[in-house]
């Protein structure tokens, strides 16, 4: 896939259009390779009073830009689908809003049968990116009681302002999130030659956090080695779950029984257990798992 756009590169400067006003930032680091979304560490340049982010603050700007999706790469079953402005424009011109624009009923376009249907594929990439953005925003809204402790603080959402020299046919959505400083992922811990020492209370706090997701109307569905963090790296005092782009949120009219089936199917608590066991072989000795997972599922 082509190199990342210049505006996502370190030292580039751009503004974001937020509900709270315009915010200017400078890119400090791009967390590459990009996957479904594009996470950048940015520094606030100019203060937006209503956002309460002072100049110099470091935050995560997470973009949902179909131009940079890793799925554009080719593989043995499909050729690469490089981005072009012309294809993006034609896809946008053909697009019709879904009959129900709710996050709960955003039906993705079927995958084109013909690999040469580049406009059809562009629509798939757009809708996937759009769905990720809307799921992330809604999940953080529902999980507001956990922000700043078990999950990052959510600051704002909006779109990227680009100069005329960088034309796009669609708005590029973005969310601003707390930067979890000096963190280490479970994946990094699992590669350590010696078992890491994590306080029992911190491991329990992770299970407490994830156990609250369902009651607040969220199923994460994608707990993995990269999105469970401990911080600070030398003396762990906080455990944090990140990345809610693949989350499923509860529809207002879904019954308890129906939502329970969703929660049981994705089983975030069991997912967390499997992730942590990659780094902590004696997890069951550190945490009383029966407090969070039914005993029959642990067999």
Image (cartoon, helix red, strand yellow):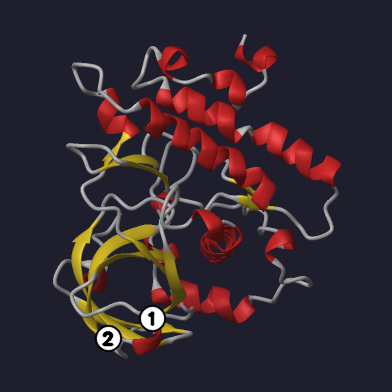
Q: In which quarter of the image is residue 263?
A: top right
**What's the residue at 46%, 36% (across, down)?**
206
Where the N terminus falls, by quadrant? Answer: bottom left
Q: In which quarter of the image is residue 285?
A: top left
The percent coordinates of residue 226 (x first, y second) are 36, 39
Q: Which label sits on residue 47?
A: 2
- Describe residue 283's horizontal placement relative to residue 221 as left or right: left
Disc 1 is placed on an element classified as: helix
**What's the residue at 28%, 87% (across, down)?**
165
- Which sits in the foreground, 147 or 263? 147
Where the C terminus falls, by quadrant? Answer: top right
Location of mark 1 (residue): 51
Disc 2 is placed on an element classified as: loop
Circles 2 and 1, Cβ within 8 Å, touching? The answer is: yes
- Describe residue 140's horizontal placement relative to residue 233 as left or right: right
The percent coordinates of residue 222 (x first, y second) are 52, 40
């Amino acid at each position: 896939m082509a190199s990342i756009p210049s505006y996502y590169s370190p030292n580039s400067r751009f503004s974001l259009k937020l509900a709270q006003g315009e915010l200017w930032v400078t890119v400090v680091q791009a967390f590459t390779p990009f996957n479904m979304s594009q996470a950048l560490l940015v520094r606030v340049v100019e203060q937006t009073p209503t956002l309460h982010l002072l100049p110099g603050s470091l935050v995560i700007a997470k973009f949902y830009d179909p131009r940079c999706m890793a799925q554009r790469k080719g593989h043995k079953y499909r050729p690469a689908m490089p981005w072009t402005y012309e294809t993006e424009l034609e896809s946008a011109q053909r697009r019709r809003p879904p009959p129900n624009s709710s996050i709960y009923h955003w039906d993705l376009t079927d995958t084109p049968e013909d690999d040469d249907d580049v406009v059809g594929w562009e629509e798939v990439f757009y809708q996937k990116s759009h769905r990720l953005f809307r799921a992330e925003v809604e999940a953080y809204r529902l999980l507001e009681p956990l922000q700043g402790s078990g999950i990052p603080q959510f600051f704002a959402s909006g779109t990227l302002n680009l100069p005329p020299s960088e034309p796009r046919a669609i708005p590029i959505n973005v969310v601003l999130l707390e930067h979890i400083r000096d963190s280490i992922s479970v994946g990094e811990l699992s590669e350590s030659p010696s078992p890491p020492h994590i306080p029992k209370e911190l491991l329990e706090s992770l299970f407490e956090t994830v156990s609250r997701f369902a009651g607040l109307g969220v199923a994460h569905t994608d707990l993995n080695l990269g999105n469970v963090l401990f911080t600070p790296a030398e003396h762990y005092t906080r455990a944090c779950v990140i990345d809610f782009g693949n989350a499923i949120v509860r529809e207002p009219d879904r019954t308890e029984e129906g939502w329970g089936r969703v929660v049981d199917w994705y089983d975030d608590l069991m997912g967390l257990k499997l992730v942590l066991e990659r780094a902590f072989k004696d997890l069951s000795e550190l945490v009383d798992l029966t407090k969070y997972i039914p005993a029959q599922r642990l067999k």
